[in-house]
Amino acid sequence: MAKTPPPDHFYKGTRMPALAPASTLDAVGVMEVRDDDIWVVSYPKAGTTWGQEVTSVIMEGGDLAKVKSKRLSERVPYLELGPLGQQSASYKRIDAMSYDVPRLIRTHLPYELMPQQWHTKKPKTLYVARNPKDTAVSCWHFTKINHFFGTRETFADFLKKFVEGDVAYGSWFDHNLAFWEHRHDPNILFVKYEDVKTDHRRMVKRIAEFYDRPLPVEMIDACVEHCTLDGTKDNRMSNHLGALYISQEKGTFHRKGEVGDWMSYFTIAQNDVLDSLYEEKMMGTGLTFDFEL
Ligand code: A3P
């Protein structure tokens, strides 16, 4: 029988999932960051897997055979994942990585919890953002397959907490807006999941240029095909099957990947609540999202 996981906890004011314990977050805060690191950052369920896979393909120069020879979690490790079973905390593995090639690192940490040296060394960082309604629906589904990630409440219960920012990794608004404020920093590229759905090719090309690793046309095409939802779903090196903290018996990690799926879940009243909060928080920020395509 599956053991009940330890509960979420608060770390420096932000609710964090049990899989990122305080001792790990303390160590991550003071870790060595390298100038040539590549960071993939997002609020959970914003398209992180896509961002990781695209980054990995580009940094391997489009060599798909090489990409497919290693699990995504090894190619782009999850920084704040603490010790699990026989596996030691992820940052230890990241610390021990060779200096010969850039490290690729994925995290959901909010801006203020990013390692101290990330703020000073300013390594290239891809931030993937997704509209809050689809993010909320995706997060809720994720709680069913990741027992470290909150509880198995009804969508209504989950959404209430999401709106209050009382979920793992805190407020969607705070997370997104903090990185958005830095969107013009030369080391940050802020991309939206909705743009990936409308123009995948342009986004891949943009990211390759940002990493200073432009790919030839045929490799861009191959990368786009490889990194689609179906591409990563069918690729056992990218589909998170076997991840220690995910059990895909009660749902699948790769679900629909749609823009506008929230419409099947939100009531009119729930939509009104989120809309007024969105208006209040986003006003004057210049950050907008598509909620349907
Ligand atoms: P849905 O639950 O709406 O289907 P993350 O990778 O940040 O955990 O986000 C997961 C969400 O992105 C899920 O959304 C999942 O289906 C979708 N997704 C996973 N891999 C994807 C890919 N390669 N391209 C587009 N969407 C992807």
Image (cartoon, helix red, strand yellow):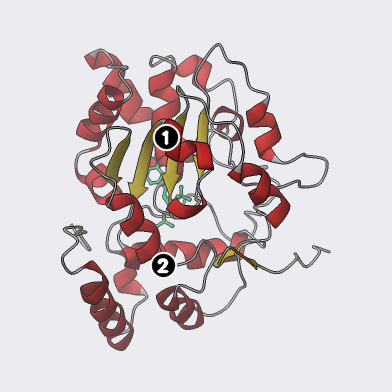
The first of marks 1 and 2 along the sequence is 2
Give residue 50's position: percent from left, percent from top: 40, 40
The one of 138 and 122 positioned closer to us in this rendering: 122
Disc 1, ligand 1: is the CB inside 8 Å?
yes
**Residue 218 higher or lower than 52, as above or below:** above
Quarter of the picture containing the N terminus is: bottom right
Residue located at (45% from left, 72% from top) = 165
Residue at the spot of label 1: 231
- Mark yes or no: residue 16 visible: yes
Disc 1 vs disc 2: Cβ atoms closer than 8 Å? no
Left or right of 206 on screen, residue 232: right
Residue 241, visible in the rendered structure: no
Q: In which quadrant of the rendered image does the C terminus lie?
A: bottom left
Q: Which residue is denoted by mark 2 in the rendering?
A: 136
Badge 2: few (under 14), some or many (20 or more) residues near its Cα, within 10 Å? many
Q: In this view, which residue lies farthest toward the front?
A: 120
Q: What's the distance in space between the residues labelled 1 and 2, CA to CA?
A: 24 Å
Q: Is residue 69 above or below residue 164?
A: above
Q: Where is residue 199 drawn, in percent x and y?
A: 20, 39
Amino acid beneath label 1: Gly
Judged from the image, the secondary structure of the residue bearing numbered disc 1 is helix
